[in-house]
Amino acid sequence: MTTKTDLKNLPLPALEQFLQGQGKERFRALQVFKWIYQQDAHSFEEMTNISKALRKELSETAIISNLEPEAVEQGNDGTRKYLFPLSDGASVEAVLIPIEGRNTLCISSQVGCAMACEFCLTGTFKLTRNLTTAEIVNQIMAVRRDLVKNPPAPSLVAAGAVDDEEDDDSPGSPAAIRNIVLMGMGEPLHNLDNVIPAIRIMIDGNGLQLSNRRVTVSTCGLVPEMGRLGREIPNVNLAVSLNATTDELRNRIMPVNRSYPLKELLQACREFPLPGRRKVTFEYVMLGGVNDTLEDAKRLLRLISDIPNKVNLIPFNEHEGCGFKSPTRAAIDAFHTYLIDRHVTVITRDSRGGDISAACGQLKGKLEKK
């Protein structure tokens, strides 16, 4: 039996090739592409400016996949957590964070994760498989759909530090997803064969129509893949989960460092193509009594001082089965102040969705436990 092609796995040039292989005109691909991403078409029958004959042919060779959330939790601050079941019974999560009217969506790239960072709940699930391109973009489309049906109340559009100092335009509608961050379940650079086409669909003017400066890819430090991402999609933002200022500690809490130590990782950051005034974002999960001292702050400054940078300080969110503790408020403030006083752009992330399962893997783990 011939397997039908999921058209959401195909960026526009690949869709053109698919239809040309069936003897169709190139412009038909653009029509179909717009129906899928701008009209959110679920079936070929909805594509009314395409002939019935072509619609019938497409239905015989292709599908348009979709995701629907199995569970949605909303916190008092407006944060929404989505759990998406996949066709093989696996599931992944996405988190929507409204900040000053600008919705940021954090999406997953894998089922589980192979990186085994000591403090990360997703890593305890281990890697099951990569998400397809379609499964990545469908998270965005499903959340967009939900926001149209259930827009956030104005009182739930939380104010807070937005990681976007270049942004000086209006927030947009409550249903608009402004920023996409590939920082959910999985290591995006471990799945570049699907992540890169997904980003191309996101930033295509005929696709999801997101600005490339609104798409951020996070990595724990896969150095060769950082180079590939920079070559193939040079205009997206890069976030690096650093989390330690010595190889000794990073080897312990982030096994990837044994393959790509700090010296190699930071050199890859220096070489990453950054357009204009953009900076590499260094994510730093603060673990109480482990990496949250002033000495750590001093070493961090030395490590990144020659790289265009901004720092996100992320106080650790304690979860069951993990021995790490949250840092004290005094430690957070001292670390933050040290960097700010030395002209580093620093954002200390407020804990969001604390009353729901907002940390990566928490909602999945809670439902599996039930």
Image: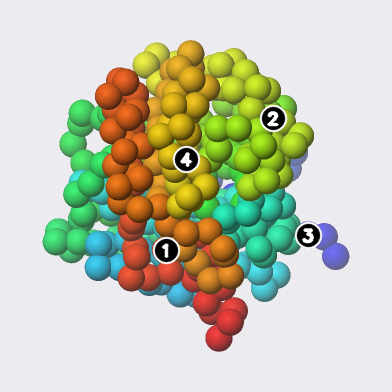
Q: Which mark is residue 284?
A: 4
Q: Bin the neighbour count of mark 3 within 10 Å (Cα to Cα): few under 14, some 14-19, many 20 and up.
A: few
Q: Bin the neighbour count of mark 4 within 10 Å (Cα to Cα): few under 14, some 14-19, many 20 and up.
A: many
The secondary structure type at the circle numbered 3 is loop
**Percent position of residue 285, x then y:** 47, 46
Closer to us: 266 or 274: 266
The secondary structure type at the circle numbered 1 is loop
| Three-letter code for the amino acid on which mark 2 is drawn | Pro
Query: How many angstroms separate mark 4 from mark 1 (CA)?
Result: 18 Å
Query: How many angstroms separate mark 4 from mark 2 (CA)?
Result: 16 Å
Looking at this view, name the residue that lies furthest to the right: 1
Find disc 2 in the rendering and name its residue.
Answer: 261
Q: Which mark is residue 169?
A: none
Query: How many angstroms separate mark 3 from mark 4 (CA)?
Result: 44 Å
Find disc 1 in the rendering and name its residue.
Answer: 358
Give the quarter of the image for residue 364.
Answer: bottom right
The residue mark sitting in front, 2 or 3, is 2
Q: Bin the neighbour count of mark 2 within 10 Å (Cα to Cα): few under 14, some 14-19, many 20 and up.
A: some
**Mark found first going from the N terminus, 4 or 2:** 2
Find disc 3 in the rendering and name its residue.
Answer: 3
Position of the N terminus by quadrant: bottom right
